Every structure is written in structure tokens, then in C-alpha cells.
Image: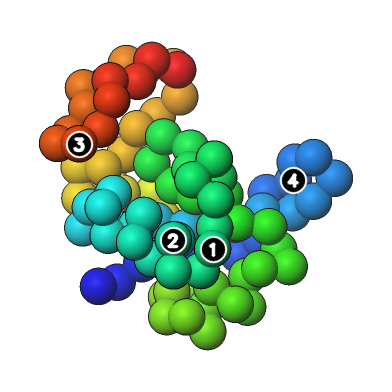
Amino acid sequence: MTVYIDPPTWPGHGRMWSHLISDESFDELHVFADGLGVPRRAFERDHYDIPSHRYADVVAAGAVEVSSREVVRLLTGAGLRRPKGRRWSAGPGEADVQP
């Protein structure tokens, strides 16, 4: 299992955020996040939003540090990229989602 995280450079809600992704499956990503106690509400389309104060914990748990550009490349290459503003079909065990 390999999951990836970019640096906490994304501002929002008075904090800086990272993106946690998998290049294999959303199931793999959910298992990793659950193991860290990351709430499911932090999942947005194709990634988890991780606040900067949790970054070191996520890396210590095994997430590989990559650039934000690499996050997009990995998601796209795996067929897991879900851009804003598009409707996509659910995979097994997922509900159809409309942004």
C-alpha cells in the first residue's frame, strides 16, 4: 500500500492543507485515513484534506511526500482524478456523486 501527501501549501479556513491520495484505490486511501483517525468528512472527491498540524503524523504513518504536481499526475495516471464541476459514476461500494 502506498499513499502520497503533498506539502501543506493550500490555504483554507485559516489553516494550510495537504492532499492525501492513493494511486491504487479509494478503498486503500480510506483504510489508511481511518487508521489515522482522519474523519471521512475530510474526503473530497479524490483526496483527503489534511491540516498542516497532522502532516508529520501522516508521513510518519507511511505516506510518501510528493509535490502537488505529482499528486495530480498520480491520480490522473491511476484513473482516480475527479475534477471539480464534473459528474462521475460511482465505483463498487460508492454512491454516485454530483459536485
Quadrant occupied by the C terminus: top left
Q: Disc 1 versus disc 4: distance between alpha carbons? A: 22 Å
Q: Amino acid at mark 4?
A: Pro
Q: Disc 2 versus disc 4: distance between alpha carbons? A: 24 Å
- Give the residue at mark 3: 93
Asked which secondary structure carries label 2, the reply is helix
Asked which secondary structure carries label 1, the reply is loop
Q: Disc 3 versus disc 2: distance between alpha carbons? A: 16 Å
Q: Amino acid at mark 3?
A: Gly
Residue at horizontal 26 percent and vertical 52 percent from the top = 27
**Would you call the spot at circle 4 few (<14 residues within 10 Å), some (14-19), or many (20 or more)?**
few
Q: Is residue 96 visible?
A: yes
Nearer the observer, 11 or 60: 60
- Give the residue at mark 2: 34
Q: Disc 4 versus disc 3: distance between alpha carbons? A: 31 Å
Q: Are marks 2 and 1 in contact (CB under 8 Å)?
A: yes
The percent position of residue 85, horizontal first and vertical second, equals: 44, 17
In this view, the residue farthest toward the left is: 92
Of mark 3 and mark 2, the one earlier in the sequence is: 2
Q: Disc 2 versus disc 1: distance between alpha carbons? A: 5 Å
Of mark 4 and mark 3, the one earlier in the sequence is: 4
Asked which secondary structure carries label 3, the reply is loop
